[in-house]
Image: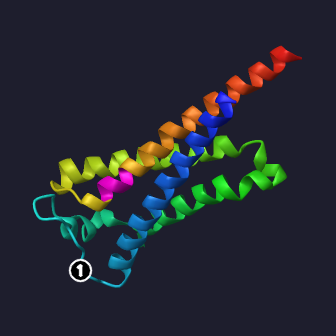
Amino acid sequence: MQISLNRDRNRSAIWIASLVGLLVSGYLTYVKLFHQPIYCTPGLGDCETVNSSQWSELWGVPIALLGMVSYLAILFLIFVAPGISFLKKYNDYLVLGTGTFGFLFSLYLTYLELFVIKTICQWCIVSAICMTIIFIFSIFAIRKSQFQQKAKRRRK
């Protein structure tokens, strides 16, 4: 029983972080695509500078849109993929892979903010925190799954 509770807790943390990340990246995508003013809490950086920098796009695609796609993919993997037989076996690893890529890319973007652009965007930091949470809890989910499989084998 303890294993499934922890697994559900891990899964809940992942989908909540994905939902928050989706909302943040959706807002940033809207701001970027429709050239809207961006809200930035005074004293917390300069979101406009970050969002209009050359690093806010990759091959002409807004980074925020790529974030939206990543968060949607994770939500798909959490809620839909377990019901698809060919994805079910590797689902935890797909979440981990997506979370790892998002975490490492967020580290790179945060580096750019701090050391190249020399200002931060509060929304980007929230997104980076969401990807970090997804990355960490997907590791926990896999560890729990492996522990559960070992326990099953011992009972046989």
Query: In the picture shown, does residue 142 fall above or below 51?
Result: above
On the image, which quarter does residue 26 sit in?
Answer: bottom left
Tell me what residue is drawn at x 38 percent, y 81 percent: 33
The residue that appears at 53% across and 59% down in the rendered structure is 70
Q: Which of the colour schemes (rainbow, by chain, secondary structure, one colour) is used? A: rainbow
Give the side of residue 107 with respect to residue 49, left or right.
right
Residue 41 is left or right of residue 36, and the answer is left
Across and down, in percent, residue 69 comes to 53, 64
Which residue corresponds to the image point at 68% horizontal and 23% vertical from the top-left?
Answer: 147
Pick the quarter of the image with the N terminus.
Answer: top right
Q: Quadrant of residue 32?
A: bottom left
Q: Which residues are magenta?
A: 124-128
In the rendered image, is residue 130 in sight?
yes
From the top left corner, tell me how far across and down residue 146 is, in percent. Answer: 69, 26
Among all residues in the image, which is located at the extreme top? 154
- Image quadrant of residue 20? bottom left
Q: Main secondary structure of the magenta part?
A: helix
The residue under the point 52% across, 59% down is 71
